[in-house]
């Protein structure tokens, strides 16, 4: 037997094909074999995880780290610690909310410099498409961004402008010629602008007021636009954080037609319901908004069916002051939910209650997002030749979310006080233990994935 660095074994090892007793053999940060449970030579370091689940680390392709420029909102050190504590072993940073945004070569260089040496897990980057930056796109790709994100409505920050259909018609050929993917925040402005008049005199602390301000039509029209562009150009399109279930028939038809279109949703759309959000609880505010209970259950159905491919966090924190908890004004508060550290237990709690299993969870949270970011040759599954990115966790154990246990920068999250199923025991990044039982172990071994 070739020399090994480490063996991690358990009675429940999750692979794309099965869940079974096995030992994961690791050498030079790579999985070199999935062997029988008892194939563990005595001279090799052994982690016997017993009955704990051994699963590929999660790949979270939707994280706003905000550094440099808005590091007081979140930063690489804190975000990647929160991620590691939840079994996330790779995150892909969004191109906006940092200053500068990742829309130019200089912006990307500043981003990489800020991240260097601070990361507890592996980190990759999305670039941005904004009006006028088409000449930058090929250079950003060559420098290692995994694809591009754009907005069809104002993004919330002035340095990252939204695009029109005309802007897209300029940028999309640049991307499709290079096989790159366009991630789209799918809301268009007109229905939102039209809704504004009906809000006059409404109570801004009432969640229903906010919900009416971001109508389903805004998402429905945006998704229709992107399906049309995808059909016309055959460019790879990815819809981020889908909320409106009205779009599902159109998306189902697009999938059946074979268009190169993928879709994500987020744990908050699958967990919360508009009917249950308390007055003034701006920690639940995000765009597009969390909608009704019936909408939520349709999203779960779309995951089951494969119309929605994946679930990622859209971790988008800000300083507590910007959440306006004192006034509880949903219309003025910053939109974004902080939850990076809880995606695994939140999703497992919801998935298990609806009859889903661990292999589906792994596909939604590791396999599919790795593929979106073009990392699927090395991330997202336990198999020979893959990076030894592993989470060891207990699906039967429960815990309560309390602010003191949160590692990301600000402790304001709508999950506070919830009882969740699924406790992470340890997280390994390329065979290095970074987190175990509430402790951070190896010091920032995360790599920047730019090639
Ligand atoms: Zn986002």
Image (spheres, rainbow, N blue to C red):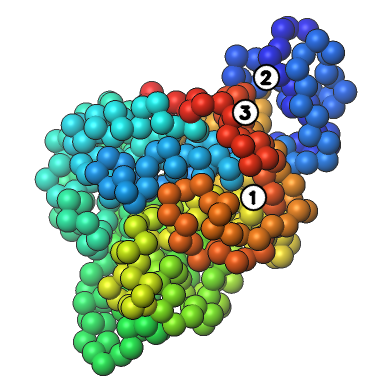
Residue at left 20%, top 41%?
100
- Image quadrant assignment for residue 393: top right
Q: What's the mark number on residue 26?
A: 2
Q: Earlier in the sequence, mark 1 or mark 2?
A: 2
Task: Give how far across and how far down residue 107 sits, in percent.
Answer: 21, 36
- Check residue 361 in the rendering and tell me which mark sits there, or answer none: 1
Q: Residues within 10 Å of mark 1 (few under 14, many from 20)?
A: many
Name the foreground residue: 91 vs 35.
91
Residue at the (21%, 77%) spot, across then down: 193
Please provide percent x and percent y for residue 305: 60, 59
Nearer to the camera, 15 or 124: 124
Dot 2: element: strand
Query: Could you tell me which secondary element the residue under label 3 belongs to?
Result: strand
Does residue 19 appear to the left or right of 381 in the view shown?
right
The residues tagged by marks 2 and 3 sit, at their Cα atoms, a distance apart of: 12 Å
Q: Which residue is mark 3?
A: 433
The percent coordinates of residue 185 (x first, y second) are: 33, 57
Looking at the image, residue 202 lies above or below residue 135: below
């Amino acid at each position: 037997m070739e020399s090994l660095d480490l063996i991690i074994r358990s009675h429940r090892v999750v692979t794309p094909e099965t869940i079974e007793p096995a030992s994961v053999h690791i050498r030079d940060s790579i999985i070199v074999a999935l062997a029988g449970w008892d194939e563990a030579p005595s001279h090799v370091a052994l982690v016997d995880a017993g009955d704990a689940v051994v699963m590929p680390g999660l790949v979270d392709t939707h994280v706003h780290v905000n550094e440099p420029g808005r590091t007081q909102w979140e930063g690489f050190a804190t975000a990647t610690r929160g991620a590691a504590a939840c079994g996330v072993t790779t995150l892909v940073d969004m191109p906006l909310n940092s200053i500068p945004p990742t829309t130019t070569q200089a912006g990307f260089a500043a981003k990489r410099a800020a991240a260097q040496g601070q990361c507890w897990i592996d980190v990759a980057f999305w670039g941005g498409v904004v009006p006028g930056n088409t000449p930058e796109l090929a250079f950003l790709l060559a420098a290692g961004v995994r694809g591009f994100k754009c907005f069809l409505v104002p993004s919330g920050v002035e340095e990252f402008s939204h695009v029109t259909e005309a802007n897209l018609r300029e940028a999309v050929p640049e991307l499709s010629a290079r096989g790159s993917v366009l991630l789209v925040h799918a809301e268009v402005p007109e229905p939102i602008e039209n809704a504004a008049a009906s809000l006059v005199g409404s109570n801004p602390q009432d969640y229903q007021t906010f919900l009416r301000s971001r109508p389903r039509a805004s998402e429905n029209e945006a998704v229709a636009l992107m399906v049309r562009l995808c059909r016309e150009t055959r460019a790879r399109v990815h819809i981020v954080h889908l909320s409106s279930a009205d779009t599902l028939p159109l998306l189902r038809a697009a999938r059946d037609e074979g268009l190169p279109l993928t879709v994500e949703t987020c744990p908050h759309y699958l967990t919360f319901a508009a009917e249950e959000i308390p007055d003034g609880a701006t920690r639940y505010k995000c765009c597009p908004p969390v909608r009704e209970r019936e909408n939520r259950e349709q999203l779960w159905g779309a995951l089951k069916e494969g119309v929605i491919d994946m679930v990622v966090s859209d971790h988008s924190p800000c300083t507590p002051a910007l959440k306006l908890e004192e006034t509880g004004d949903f219309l003025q508060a910053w939109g974004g939910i902080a939850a990076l550290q809880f995606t695994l237990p939140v999703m497992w709690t919801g998935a298990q209650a609806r009859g889903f299993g661990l292999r589906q969870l792994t596909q939604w949270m590791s396999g599919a997002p790795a593929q979106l970011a073009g990392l699927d040759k090395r991330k997202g599954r336990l198999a020979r030749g893959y990076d030894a990115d592993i989470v060891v966790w207990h699906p039967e154990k429960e815990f309560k979310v309390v602010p003191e246990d949160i590692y990301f920068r600000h402790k304001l999250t709508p999950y506070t006080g919830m009882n969740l199923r699924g406790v992470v025991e340890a997280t390994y990044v390329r065979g290095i233990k970074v987190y175990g039982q509430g402790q951070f172990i190896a010091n920032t071994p995360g790599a920047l994935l730019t090639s």
